[in-house]
Amino acid sequence: MPVDFEVKRHIATITLNRPEAMNSLDPESIAQLGEAWHEIRTNPDIRVAILTGAGPKSFCTGTDMKKAPPVTECMAATYLRDGQPLIPQMKTWKPIIAAINGYAVGGGLEMALACDLRLASTHAKFGLTEVKVASLAGLNGTQVLPRVVPQAVAMKMLLTGEMIGAEDALRYGLVSDVVPLDELLPLAMKYAEKIAGAAPLSVQATKQAAVLGLDMPLDHGIAFSHLMWGILRDTEDRKEGFNAFAEKRDPQFRGA
């Protein structure tokens, strides 16, 4: 299986499992990723997801150009019928953590950019190298990278195809944590467990307010955030959270 998928204790883990091909994406991988993201979006037992790669070398290096299927239709036909692959499938208000265990290049970095938390191993490398093969970062890279790192850094990466290391990624704000490889998945799981232990509706509403608020004027974002607070006010989980605090016990959240 080119993609491993498991769910434990409300945490879904997706592992790209083609280490011999630097965890690049062939058609079968893309199809299985779509199935995994659908399960994450629709399964109420899943509260948070971790995306990582198998092996010590690579998170994901994007499209497997050796296995890319030949073009049989014009772009308009495929785009208008099927839409864009990969990134739209990741759209969910459930948080996604990228545990970047090595090279995150091309579509691999673009998938990481679609995640909410990005953690990296000390030897990870990041790049959007599409200009070197007469292409561009068309999933989300040209739009998201300049919003995540300083524009000058983003433009250098996009226009030259040069890669940066984990320490620079941390300095620029592309990742939040850099740890040795053997500590990477335990750290991702630690954060995932904290998220899974919080009230699911509160977590999803918080992500929605933060993500959508970035596209709003500040006052509009604050107003929207207040409305989201009001939506949560009468949930059973909020009552449980208050009662658990008063009774000095761990809350039992149900997502209701």
Image (tube, helix red, strand yellow):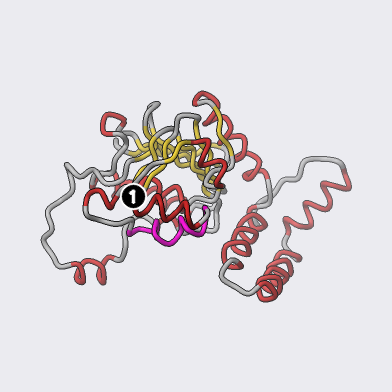
Quarter holding the C terminus is: bottom right
Circle 1: element type = helix
Considering the image in quadrants, where does the N terminus appear?
Answer: top left
Q: Residue 129 at x, y = what percent? A: 31, 47
Secondary structure mostly seen in magenta is helix
Q: Nearer the viewer, residue 168 or 120?
A: 168
Q: Amino acid type of disc 1?
A: Thr
Say which residue appears at 32% left-offset and 36% top-offset. Answer: 23
Marks counted in the figure total: 1
State yes or no: residue 148 in magenta.
Answer: yes
Choose between 111 and 249: the one closer to the eye: 111
Say if the magenta span includes residue 200. no
Q: Which residue, given by chain and number where applicable, does mark 1 sit on?
A: 160
Give the answer, above or below, for where 176 lies relative to 181: below
Q: Nearer the viewer, residue 113 or 38?
A: 113
Please state the horizontal and vertical placement of residue 153, each as a whole percent of the image: 47, 51
Q: Quadrant of residue 189?
A: top right
**Residue 143, located in which quarter of the rendered image?**
bottom left
Percent from the top left, x then y, of residue 186? Answer: 56, 29
* Image-quadrant location for residue 71: bottom left
Residue sitting at x 59%, y 63%? 208
Is 196 left, or right, of 104 in this rendering?
Answer: right
In the displayed structure image, the side of residue 234 where residue 13 appears, left or right: left
Residue occupying the point 68% across, 47% down: 198
Q: Which residues are magenta?
A: 138-149
| Left or right of 58, for residue 10 | right
In x, y percent, where is residue 95? 55, 51
- Work out whether 115 lies above or below 59: below
Residues packed near mark 1 inside 10 Å, few (<14), some (14 to 19) or many (20 plus): some
